[in-house]
Amino acid sequence: MPSRYEIRIKGRVTEALLPHFEGLSAHVEPVETTLYGTIEDQAALHGLLERIEALGLELIEVRRTAGQP
């Protein structure tokens, strides 16, 4: 079942890297980037986390948020 997530990454995710997170919205701040949106299932979440690691980004937090997908 799809769930909404908020994923915080240390630093600014550049415009060149944002397409790797298609389907998620991004809020870029000077010290961190927040990705948020609906993720279909646990397999998709794990794939996203692997992509963050493969891009050399530092994960700060993953949080499932309230609300409908």
Image (cartoon, helix red, strand yellow):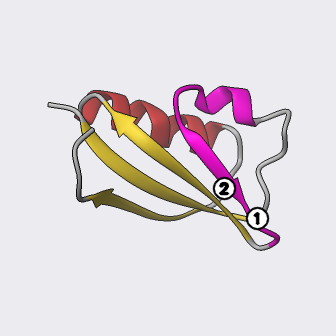
Q: At which x and y percent is residue 66? A: 23, 59
| In this rendering, position of residue 41 left or right of residue 44 | left
Q: Is residue 48 magenta?
A: no
Viewer-side label of 1, 2: 2
**Residue in the image at 43% along x and 56% along y:** 6
Magenta extent:
18-30
Q: Nearer the viewer, residue 10 or 35?
A: 35
Give the secondary structure at mark 2: strand
Q: From what the image shows, is residue 18 above or below residue 64?
A: above
Which of pointers 1 and 2 lies earlier in the amino acid sequence? Answer: 1
Quadrant occupied by the C terminus: top left
Query: Compared to 1, does 34 lie above or below?
Result: below
For image coordinates 60% across by 32% down, the residue present is 21
Picture quadrant where residue 59 is located: bottom right
Q: Nearer the viewer, residue 35 or 47?
A: 35
Indicate the secondary structure of the residue bearing disc 1. loop
Q: Please provide percent x and percent y for residue 45.
A: 36, 37
Location of the N terminus by quadrant is: top left
Q: Which residue is mark 2?
A: 27
Real-space Cα distance between discs 1 and 2?
11 Å
Q: Which residue is mark 1?
A: 11
Decide: is 1 above or below 14.
above
Q: Return the x and y of residue 31 as percentages of the image width and height.
A: 76, 73
User: At label 1, which amino acid type do we have?
Assistant: Gly
User: Tag 2: Cα neighbours inside 10 Å, few (<14), some, or many (≥20)?
Assistant: few
Q: Around disc 1, counting alpha carbons within 10 Å, would you say few (fewer than 14), some (14 to 19), or many (20 or more)? A: some
Q: Nearer the viewer, residue 5 or 49?
A: 5
